[in-house]
Image (cartoon, rainbow, N blue to C red):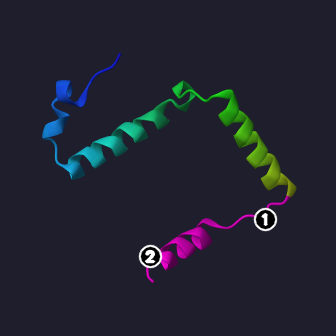
């Protein structure tokens, strides 16, 4: 089923309202994650990343380090 924004009247929403709606739609997928399709390529990539982490858990960066680096880029 393909429904357009116009058919639903979503073009009348403000950008902020559309963002909130998109977040709500995205979050609704977590109710039944098994219903979200994952391709074989995605599954293989996830397995490769998990294997790499198990081989060397300290090789990556913490989420706090990543956020700090990203915030630092915007301040210059």
- Number of disc labels: 2
Q: Nearer the viewer, residue 11 or 27?
A: 11
Mark 1, secondary structure of its residue: loop
| Vertical position of residue 59 compared to residue 43: above or below | below
Residue appearing at x 53%, y 29% in the figure: 36
Q: Residues within 10 Å of mark 2 (few under 14, many from 20)?
A: few
The quarter holding residue 7 reads top left
Tag 2 secondary structure: loop
Who is closer to the viewer here, 32 or 54?
Answer: 54
Q: Earlier in the sequence, mark 1 or mark 2?
A: 1
Sort mark 1 into few (<14), some (14-19) or many (20+) by Cα contacts within 10 Å. few
Residue 44 x/y as whole percent: 74, 35
Query: Which residue is at the far front?
Result: 76
At 45% across and 83% down in the image, what residue appears?
A: 76
The image quadrant that residue 34 belongs to is top right
Which segment did they paint magenta? 56-76
> Quick one: which residue is furthest to the left in this view?
12
Q: Is residue 65 magenta?
A: yes
15 relative to 39, above or below: below
Give the labeled residue for mark 2. 74
Question: What percent of the width, then of the height, locates residue 74?
Answer: 44, 76
Q: Residue at x 58, y 71 (%)?
A: 64
Residue under label 1:
59
- Percent position of residue 56, x then y: 84, 60
Distance Cα–Cα, label 1 vs label 2: 25 Å
Is 12 situated left or right of 47 in this image? Answer: left
Expressed as whole percent of the image width and height from the top left, the position of residue 66 reads 59, 69
């Amino acid at each position: 089923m393909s429904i357009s924004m116009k058919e639903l009247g979503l073009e009348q929403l403000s950008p902020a309202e559309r963002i909130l709606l998109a977040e709500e739609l995205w979050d609704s997928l977590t109710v039944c994650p098994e219903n979200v399709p994952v391709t074989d390529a995605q599954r293989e990539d996830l397995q490769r990343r998990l294997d790499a982490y198990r081989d060397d858990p300290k090789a990556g960066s913490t989420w706090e380090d990543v956020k700090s680096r990203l915030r630092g880029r915007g301040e210059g």
